[in-house]
Image: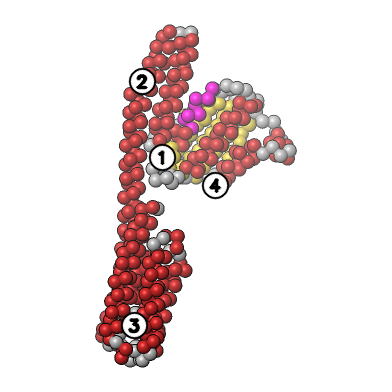
Amino acid sequence: MRAALAVEDQLFRAIAVLRVVVLVYAVVGNLVRGVGAFDHPGAGYLMLAVMVAWTGFATWAYADAVRRGVALIVADLAVALALLAATPVVKSPDFDASVPGFWVMAALLAWAVRFRWVGGLVAGVVLGAVDIVLRAAPDGTDVGNLFLLLLGGPVVGYMCGSLQQMATERDLAERAAAAAAERARLARVVHDGVLQVLSLVQRRGGELGGQGAELARLAGEQESALRSLIRAQDSVRSDGAEGAVDVAAALGRLGLRPGVDVAVPGGAVELPAEVASELLAVVVACLDNVERHVGDGAPAWVLLESFGDRVEVSVRDEGPGIPEGRLAAAASEGRLGVSQSIRGRIEDLGGEARLTSASYGTEWEFVVPR
């Protein structure tokens, strides 16, 4: 989500500032101690130069989310560990303060921001363990520093994850509120204008008779379609993801087709968008077959029933039925309308398709789990 990425960008910008601050502290501290603090002054100053160079590179690299991959995060920690490991050689085995000092915090925080509390804990354990192992005689201060590393990394990582979650939820809530407000505005416009006009045409056209009655019928169909559309849009999620869709409203719109009678429950019947789309496509395929094999405007009935663990849809007509062996012959000839468009879709949804056909008509029954 964009909100989570924006939070991560802000945190890495803060780490960039911190990286410069602790770099200045480390460089000034080592210069104040002077040449006498190093057994190998040239190597010590080279380490400071590496810290300056890596700080500049890391500040640039972390600025773009595209470059903030695992390789960069691992390299950041590796550089910090290498500088820690070189300290006993450059100074002495009984060194007091490491050359990088607090500069290694930047790598720790980068791991915490990128991999949350787990990353912070891993980086803290690795940095703390290396620092303790390298010291000839760790004292209370060293143990305290280890404790802070083990505590600070996970805490920062957890806070980062919480901030990202809150930003994402806030973004979704704002988008949902805006979408709800727009739906309400459109519903008012349609209700106060279009639906009232269509209702008036339907009523007056029926009174006039003749061509007016035909206009009344068409106005009634469009009024029903608009009401179904207003009802269906309330089930569309505003976060851009495919969420729950009211399959009852979607099937209800099929009642506008000539000869088709649709019966659905009074309330919404919500299914995942992909499932609802496939189920609707199956019903449409059945109705298309009725038109093709029985005739345009031939009566057909669609019934939707909703249960706790499944939905059941039946499509029935009063045609001559499907001759025995007709479907098998069609499949062998490469005509896979029934086997793929109907049975295949239902089976892909984990459901069951049952066909009953005789001289009195054909009925499909579809059972799809919720």
Q: Is residue 41 above or below residue 27?
A: below
Quarter where residue 49 is shown? bottom left
Q: Is residue 298 magenta?
A: no
Residue 337 falls in image quadrant: top right
Q: Is residue 255 magenta?
A: yes
Q: Position of residue 317 (x, y in %)?
A: 58, 27
Earlier sequence position, callout 3 versus callout 1: 3
Q: Which amino acid, mark 1? A: Val
In front here: 23 or 101? 23
Residue designated by label 3: 99
Residue 153 showing in the rendered view = no
Q: Which residue is mark 2?
A: 196
How many numbered callouts? 4
Task: Name the residue rendered at 40%, 39% in the picture.
Answer: 235
Task: State whether residue 30 is above or below residue 255.
Answer: below
Determine crowd level at label 4: few under 14, some 14-19, many 20+ residues with C-alpha closer than 10 A: few
Dot 3: element:
loop
**Which of the marked residues, 1 or 2, is nearer the chain's N terminus?**
2
For label 1, count other residues whose C-alpha is less than 10 Å away and answer few (under 14), some (14-19) or many (20+): some
State the residue position of label 1. 236
- Which mark is nearer the camera, 3 or 1? 3
Q: Earlier in the sequence, mark 4 or mark 3?
A: 3
Instruction: Answer with left or right where residue 26 lies relative to residue 54.
Output: left
Q: Position of residue 173 (x, y in %)?
A: 32, 46
Magenta segment's dominant SS is: helix
Give the alpha-carbon distance from disc 2 to disc 3, as whole Å: 80 Å
Disc 2 is placed on an element classified as helix
Residues drawn in magenta = 251-258
Instruction: Give the residue drawn at x 60%, y 22%.
Output: 296
